[in-house]
Image (cartoon, rainbow, N blue to C red):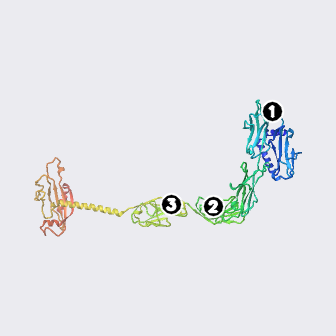
Amino acid sequence: MASGEQRGHIAGGTMPVLTLLTLFSSIMENTVAEAALRPYVTMDPDWRTIFEDDEMTLTCNVPDRLRTNDDGFYWYKNNEQVLSQEQKLHIRRAKTSNSGEYQCKTSTSDKSEPVQLDVSRGKHKLLLQSPPNIVEGDALDMRCHSSSGYNKKEDTTFYKDAAVIQRPRHNFHLPNVNKSMSGIYRCEKTIGNGKLLKSDETFIFVQDLFTSPTIRATTINIKEGDAMTLTCDTRLNPLREDTALEFSFYKNGDKVQEFGPTRTYKVQPAKLEDSGNYNCRVRTPKDAVRKMSNVLHINIRAAVNKPNLTLLPSTVAVGRDVLLRCQSSKGSVPIYYRFYHNQTFIGNITTRQKGAAELRLSIKSLTMGGVYYCISQNDFHTQQQQSEVVSLLVIEPVEGITITADKGGEDFAPGQSLTFTCSIQRGSSISVFWKHNESLVEESSDHYQLQDNGKVLYIDSLQNHHKGTYQCHANNALNRTFSVYSETRNINIVDISAADHSFQWAMLGVLLFVLILIIALIFKFRENIVCPGRGHKTPSSTGRETQKDNGDDGQQNNTSGSEGIYQNTVATRRDIDDDVSYAYINIRAPQAASSYPTAARDNDFQVLYSTVKCSDVTPETTTDEKTLEMSTAIYHTITAHDINHRQPNLMEDMKEG
């Protein structure tokens, strides 16, 4: 009983439970690993603690691989041999002296693991009975057992690590235990008289059914074309030697072999793509217990092949970055890459897993353009592999674009020539485009001529379809990212000939109007025209009287006070060549009574007519007045102002003529 009390003290003492679990786990891992091919002891009933006078049977179990026809069994208690040589050891009425560690062996095996049996005296009124060995996947059965006289099944409570796990049942059953169920257990019971009984604390440890698996390869130097074999190793707990296990294998997290009884995975011949991270998993057939191994990296060794170099992008502007990607599709890692620009080393990258080596460059000048290549190599073979050369085009962004014309202003006459020039301050690999009224100018257009690689737009003869806005657009020919537009220029075509024609037609219209007016006046007043030597003529159709030139100054004989008097008061003047004659007509208003002042009524007017002879017909050659009249034409007409202002001078001029 001393050992049982000591064990309870350890469980309930100051040692942390986690530390205790770790210690037991470590011990049992080593025990399971070393206990293969040894017998093991079981109890019936399966309690490691019993009261005095209880019965107990211990059995020495031998794995099939150790069983022989002449097996003899040997029992040990506290490392001392017991006289019995049977497979089973019976304890009819247990005594405290039967407490101790029991072991067994056969004539061909080592000793089994010890099994502890504790026999308690009657003063311990309540016992927590549990199996001596608990393995993953087993069912855990516990009983809160009273001594004789206290065997009533009343109000029983079970505790794990001071927490209630079940009440109020007499027995505790838990199927399919796992490692997390290790811990400190106890029970309490209230008997009929209300007395509370408490058991001692018992530490229960759940053993591994099998050890954590490990994966290994037959060799670490596997070359391409060799056979590759991976093995998943684990060991069963000797208490569960006959348990069947299943194995599966994984590569980079993907299953490559399903669960089955085979604990190996084979690949033949191995290829470079078989390289990767492998692990295995082990489980029981019903998947009650499952464990996963460590990860094993397999590197199939092979020489590198010719690498491929790509530039992203292949055309780059100054100030931007370019990414160099070099990769050998074949070859075991690590692979060592070196980068070169125009035979000059610029950097190196080492890859330790499959993939490309990437080197990023910042383009600072146009001199960084040119050819690039890379070299790859690994430890399997010292021979280097070189990629093809790849060209990098470095361009300058387009900046400072202006448009100029060889003539100033915006207004141009039709037929003039005009030259636009697109000037660019900086940029490389430039393409220039022109736009007229937002439409692209085609090189094949008949209206324009593109010169100097498109930088000059020449118009030989400006026409109406040339008017509008002009703009030049420049960009880098191989990279549309950099693109600029100039300011716009406006062109107007002024049609001067049309303006002249309009003016001429306007003047012609004015002259025609004046001519028609003159002709109308002539026809209106032709009856009062007196040619030289023809005397006075009074229109007979109007009924007006005429005053003869008989020397009566200012005398008028009015026959009708309501009509004006038309009078030729002065002699006509004929030019020296007798081709031009003048006729003077005085128009005088009648002197009727009026309330207006005299000055306002003095409204005499004069009209001077001139005629030019159109033929040789004269008064001397014909007496036909109609023929004489048709032989002359009006040459000019002068309308005089108020007779009071103009008559003296006019009369004087005509007398002198």
Please state the horizontal and vertical placement of residue 446, each as a whole percent of the image.
Answer: 43, 67
Q: For the residue labelled by badge 2, is the local secondary structure a helix, a strand or a loop?
A: strand
Q: What's under tag 2, amino acid-wise?
A: Leu
The answer to which of 17 and 279 lies nearer the viewer is 279
Question: Real-space Cα distance between discs 3 and 2?
Answer: 33 Å
Q: Earlier in the sequence, mark 1 or mark 3?
A: 1
How many neighbours does mark 3 have within 10 angstroms: few (below 14), some (14-19), or many (20 or more)?
Answer: some
At x 36%, y 63%, the residue is 496
Q: Which of marks 3 and 2 is nearer the N terminus?
A: 2
Residue identifier under label 3: 401
Q: What's under tag 1, amino acid-wise?
A: Gly
Quadrant containing the N terminus is: top right
The image quadrant of residue 89 is: top right
| 486 w.r.t. 8: above or below | below
Residue identifier under label 2: 324
Please state the horizontal and vertical placement of residue 57, each as a whole percent of the image.
Answer: 83, 43
| 451 w.r.t. 157: above or below | below
Q: What's under tag 3, amino acid-wise?
A: Ile
Disc nearest the viewer among 1 and 2: 1
Q: For the residue labelled by badge 3, is the local secondary structure a helix, a strand or a loop?
A: strand
Question: Real-space Cα distance between discs 1 and 2?
Answer: 89 Å
Q: Earlier in the sequence, mark 1 or mark 2?
A: 1
Disc nearest the viewer among 3 and 2: 2
How many neighbours does mark 1 have within 10 angstroms: few (below 14), some (14-19), or many (20 or more)?
Answer: few
On residue 149, the disc is 1
Residue 461 visible within the image: yes
